[in-house]
Structure formats: C-alpha cells, structure tokens
C-alpha cells in the first residue's frame, strides 16, 4: 500500500477562476488566488502556457529558505526580494520563497512528447511558486507556472508532500 498521507490531500487549480484549492479527504480546507499563464492553456514546450490535466508534486524546494528568497534554476541565490531589487532587475521572472515542481501523469498530454513535440510538465519546469507581492493575483500573467503570494506558498508548502495530486482544470 502506498503512503496514504499523500492521498488525503489534493490540489485543484482552476484557470478560469485563477484559484488554487487545497482539499483534504475531499473537504475544501484552503483556497488561494493565483496567476497562471498569460498565454493561456497548453502543454507544448516553449509555449509559455499552463498545462491542464493530472499532475503530482514531484519536488518541494526551498523549505528552509526565508520568505522572499530568490531562486534561479531552483537554487537560492542568497538574495531576498524587495522593491529595490525588483527595480534593479525589471526583466527577471521572479521565483520566490518556495517551489512546488509539478510532473504530469498523462502520456502525450502533459508527460513525454506528442505529435507537436515535447509536452512534459516536468521538463518544462512548471512550478507553483511565490512571486513579488506587487504582482496581481487573479490575473493570468505568468510564463506558464502558477504564481502565488509568498505567504500563501509558504502556507501551502507546509501542508503538502511530494506525491500530492494536482489537477489543473480549465473551468
């Protein structure tokens, strides 16, 4: 029998509502405003879209990092995001505080390849992660990832495990 602790929690990310809901035994225990891809829904490599379908949290990264810690390539840089740093590097796509790295479960849809090429959520580096608090939530603005407020991603990170199911739905 698999570790049942991973089965009691699951996440549903609703693109239309720009919301992430945490369920425990099918009871809603938390809901957070998020920001998904400005390019819309899709799973192809380099599309800048948020993939639909069934996923799991493959890796949890940054559990001991301070809030607003800056990550590049999933490694903390030692920087702590603030407005001055944001103004210094306006072109950066900020990944802050915590990373929940997603892996797709549906071959040819969000895992592996299909006729159009790569469609693998994990290989596309699709995360649930923190973003500067100046970024709007409830508005599709990301490059494919699911952005959250830093306090929210820290709270969510503490409640989920690697292997937690994540469903990303259009509506």
Image (spheres, helix red, strand yellow):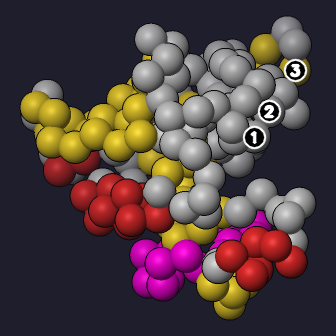
Q: Is the magenta stretch mostly helix, strand or loop?
A: loop
Q: Which of marks 2 and 1 is nearer the N terminus?
A: 2
Q: On the image, numbered disc 3 is attached to which residue? A: 117
Q: Earlier in the sequence, mark 3 or mark 2?
A: 2
- Asked if the magenta segment contains residue 69, the reply would be yes
Up-down relation of residue 13 to residue 41 (above or below): below
- Dots 2 and 1: beta carbons under 8 Å? yes
- Looking at the rendered structure, the secondary structure element under dot 2 is loop
Identify the residue shown where x is 85% and y is 64%: 90
Q: Position of residue 44 (x, y in %)?
A: 79, 23
Residue 64: say if magenta: yes
Residue displayed at 86% across by 72% down: 89
Name the residue nearer the viewer: 146 or 62. Answer: 146
Residue occupying image coordinates x 41% and y 40%: 33
Q: How far apart are marks 3 and 2 (CA)?
A: 14 Å
Check disc 1: other Cα within 10 Å, few if <14, some if 14-19, many if 20+. Answer: many
Question: Percent x, y for residue 75?
Answer: 68, 76
Q: Position of residue 91 (x, y in %)?
A: 89, 60
Q: Give the range drawn in magenta.
A: 62-76
Question: Quick check: can you spot residue 160?
Answer: yes
Q: How far apart are marks 2 and 1 (CA)?
A: 5 Å
Q: Residue placed at 25% from the left, 58% from the top? A: 159
Callout count: 3
Sequence-wise, which precedes: disc 1 or disc 3? 3
Residue receiving disc 2: 48
What is the C-alpha distance between the residues marked 1 and 3? 19 Å
Tag 1 residue: 143
Please state which of the two labelled residues, at mark 1 or mark 3, is closer to the viewer: 1
């Amino acid at each position: 029998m698999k570790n049942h602790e991973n089965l009691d929690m699951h996440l549903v990310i609703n693109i239309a509502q720009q919301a992430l809901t945490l369920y425990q035994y099918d009871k809603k225990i938390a809901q957070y405003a998020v920001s998904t891809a400005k390019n819309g829904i899709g799973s192809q490599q380099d599309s800048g879209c948020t993939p639909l379908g069934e996923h799991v949290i493959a890796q949890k990264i940054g559990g001991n990092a301070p809030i607003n810690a800056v990550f590049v390539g999933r490694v903390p840089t030692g920087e702590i995001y603030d407005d001055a740093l944001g103004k210094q590097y306006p072109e950066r796509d900020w990944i802050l505080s915590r990373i929940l790295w997603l892996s797709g479960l549906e071959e040819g849809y969000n895992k592996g390849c299909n006729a159009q090429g790569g469609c693998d959520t994990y290989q596309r580096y699709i995360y649930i992660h923190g973003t500067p608090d100046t970024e709007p939530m409830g508005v599709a603005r990301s490059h494919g990832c699911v952005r959250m407020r830093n306090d929210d991603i820290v709270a969510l990170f503490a409640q989920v495990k690697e292997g937690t199911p994540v469903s990303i739905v259009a509506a």
